[in-house]
Amino acid sequence: MALLAVADAQQRIIALTPRLASESVHLRDARHRINAADIIATRALPSFDNSAMDGYAVRASDVPATLPVTAVIAAGAAVTQLPTLAPGTAMQIFTGAPLPPGADAVIIVEDVTRRGDTVVLPAARGGDNVRRCGEDIAVGECAITAGIKLGAGALAMLAAQGCSTVQVARRPRVAIIATGDELVDVDTPLQPGQIVDSSAHMLAAQIREAGGEPHYLGVIADEPTAMTRALQQALSFDVVLTTGGVSAGERDYVRPALAAAGIELEFWKVAMKPGKPFAFGLGTSTLVFALPGNPVSSLVAFELFVRPALLAMQGAATLFRLKVPVRLPTGFEKSAGRAHFLRAHVGCDDRGLVAEVHHKQGSAMLSSIVNWNALVEIPADTTTIVADGIAMAWLTGE
């Protein structure tokens, strides 16, 4: 049977991913949540014409000239109580202060000479150093679109619009089930033949970064009944991740357990390295991802398949990492048939973006996922990237 291509696997997963309901959260808790609906401005920004600089409010047609200073306008002055700027006069004004009626320009303080109650002013054009009402956002305009991750700037916009709460997508609840008799918790003293379940902590971090809530259900013994029972109990979550036991060995019980738990397997095995023994299935309302046992394979499979699904559940407008061309100084060679995803650190030199591919690319090599920030993709049908050749890299931002 031909292996499923990575892009095809991604499309099939996204097509079967349900959208979660939204919930209301306070602005202080909204950082990095996915905005659930368009935010339509009910306030103009700025809400009144104001000065962009400290200086003097004038009629542009009156300058250059020496004019009397008739008033001082500070930030916070009441717009409805402003005096009108008479022709042939100027008013001292401060940054953010409302522009007085009659004024159409502000001349910055550095360009004038103050002489007692008068000021020597250079020429100006209408609109100089003036912020017009609504020039940033007009009433009725979409201030924030649905599907974006609410960062610091979006939170500032929400506050400026008077939104103390915002509708965001509910966080997906993700169960993590580890398989393997050799696995133990990080606090357990290691006995001969035992391995710390490092993937649990890695996946929990990846889940949080994608907006989900990780719930570690522990290590399940390599025994079919125990695995089936664990999967059945986990189906109350939005997503279930298993690690290990998904290959074709005699003690790989995950796929039979999926079937026994009533989970319909959509596909198994993807044409990629690392991460080939990857499976995806559906419970009644739960997405189930069977990840490989090696940590690096699980990390790559999560990046390519689970992360986009979690974002799709939240209605995110952007599901996949930014993909950019990078230069490979050392080149790369492989056999045709599977796409390779190389852990790398992408930086910039005088020739553009360059990827330093980690020299250890084995699927159990944890050193390759320390201080990395990109997955360099070598397509399935590509066998050679020459030295200083170009490849595409998914920027992970780690």
Image (cartoon, rainbow, N blue to C red):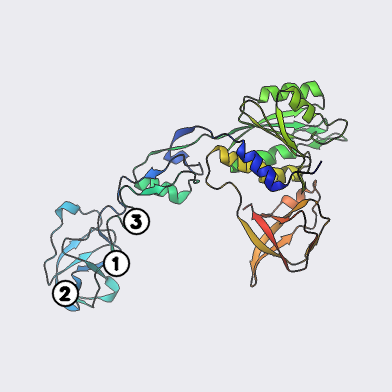
Viewer-closest of 279 and 60: 279
**Residue 289 picture location, percent across and down:** 70, 35
> Vertical placement of 247 versus 284: above or below?
below
Q: Nearer the viewer, residue 136 or 6?
A: 6
Q: Is residue 320 left or right of residue 270?
A: left
Q: CA distance from mark 1 to mark 2?
A: 16 Å
Which corner quadrant holds the N terminus?
top right
Q: Quadrant of residue 60?
A: bottom left
Kind of residue at badge 1: Asn
The type of residue carrying mark 3 is Asp
Describe the element under mark 3 as helix, strand or loop: loop
User: Residue 149: image x %, image y %?
Assistant: 50, 46
**Residue at 21%, 54% in the rendered image:** 77
Report helix, strand or loop for mark 2: helix
Left-right relation of 84 to 40:
left
Dot 3 or dot 2: first in sequence order is: 2
Residue at the image position 78 percent from the left and 50 percent from the top: 338
Give the labeled residue for mark 1.
129
- Residue 171's place in the image compared with 301, above or below, is above
Give the label on residue 62, or none: 2
Neighbours of disc 3 within 10 Å: few (<14), some (14-19), many (20+): few
Q: Can you tell which mark lies on residue 136?
A: 3
**Foreground pick, 26 / 194:** 26
- Would residue 211 be seen by someone viewing this image from the given angle? no
Q: Nearer the viewer, mark 3 or mark 1?
A: 3
Residue 146: % across, % down: 46, 43
Disc 3 to disc 2, C-alpha distance:
28 Å
Image position of 56 (left or right of 265):
left
* Mark earlier in primary sequence (1, 2): 2
State the CA–CA distance, disc 3 to disc 1: 15 Å
